[in-house]
Image: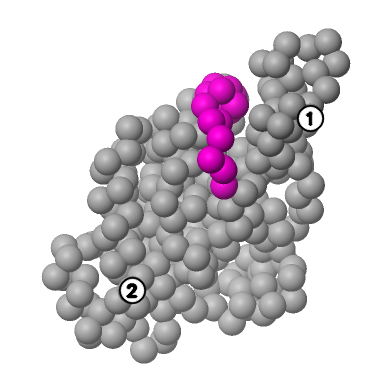
Amino acid sequence: MAFNIAVAGKGGTGKSTLSALIIRYITEELGKPVSAVDADPNASLGALLGVHVQNTIADIREEILEKKADFAGMSKERYIEYAIEESIIEKEKYDLLTMGRPEGPKCYCYVNNLLRKYMDKVGTTYPFVVTDNEAGMEHISRRTTNNVDLLLIVSEPTVVGVLTIHRILKLADSLPVSIKKKLCILNRVPKSGIHENLQQKLEELGIEISSIFPFDEEVYDTAACGASVFEISRENDLYVKIGKFLQKHIPVSLLEKSSGVQV
């Protein structure tokens, strides 16, 4: 089964950038293929990886529910499976599936159940699945695989951000899925470090921070230019820190570098 990494956090914390850098590290430094899932309605993971997304799961859902889909002699189930496969962007190092906009008031159970079935199948063919989630993490419980090996909860170094971490931790405990390990990350931390008031709030809420990632000028410049994370230098401090972090939390059996990536 795939080692499933899910990244959560409110908007503006840099979680999509961290998701993209994690995907880059696994594919380039470990040489392992990744099934990447963009489950954030903002859908920015593709751009960060340097690809243009045209088709999303949301498009498939609406076509089916509005009866605009032409099944071309296929059963509805086979058509949805085919449409999901067609919506995947296949690259040399990874595949990307984009969920798209959130659901409306209609019933999406049928399509979502088929998507979950498809994602469970993906979990048997890739060594890694990396999912960039929305803050509420509804995609984990409704649409993706039922098992998360590593949930990374990302926040900026503010009291509001820490309160969001607390809320997501409580939400994660209530989800009907298996989450083996939950780690909290403070991202974009200034050189001066964590403010003493923020440290006090962390202690008050009983939140343990597993890693602190600094604000990075090169990552900022790359994003400002609209370039992909693959343009960032291998010696970049943040990229190196992410690599060391993953080395600590990925099973040893998956850390051995492969000679090449084949998806």
- The reply, left or right, for residue 197 in relation to residue 192 is left
Q: Tell me the distance, in whole angstroms, between the alpha carbons under discs 2 and 1.
A: 43 Å
Q: Is residue 32 left or right of residue 248?
A: right
Assign a secondary structure to mark 2.
Answer: helix
Circle 2/circle 1 CB separation < 8 Å: no
Name the residue: 49% across, 53% down.
134
* Image spot of residue 21 (x, y percent): 58, 59
Which mark is drawn over residue 68? 1
The residue that appears at 57% across and 43% down in the rendered structure is 104
Q: Image quarter for residue 208? A: bottom left
Question: Which residue corresponds to mark 2?
Answer: 160
In the rendered view, would you say 116 is above or below 247?
A: above
Q: Choose the circle earlier in sequence order: 2 or 1.
A: 1
Image location of residue 31, percent across then percent down: 63, 43
Give the extent of the magenta segment: 102-118
Identify the colour scheme used: one colour
Q: Is residue 171 left or right of residue 15?
A: left
Of residues 227 and 247, the one nearer the viewer is 227
In which image quadrant can residue 22 be found?
bottom right
Q: Nearer the viewer, mark 2 or mark 1?
A: 1
Instruction: Say what amino acid the circle numbered 1 marks.
Output: Lys
**Position above or below: 127 against 28:** above
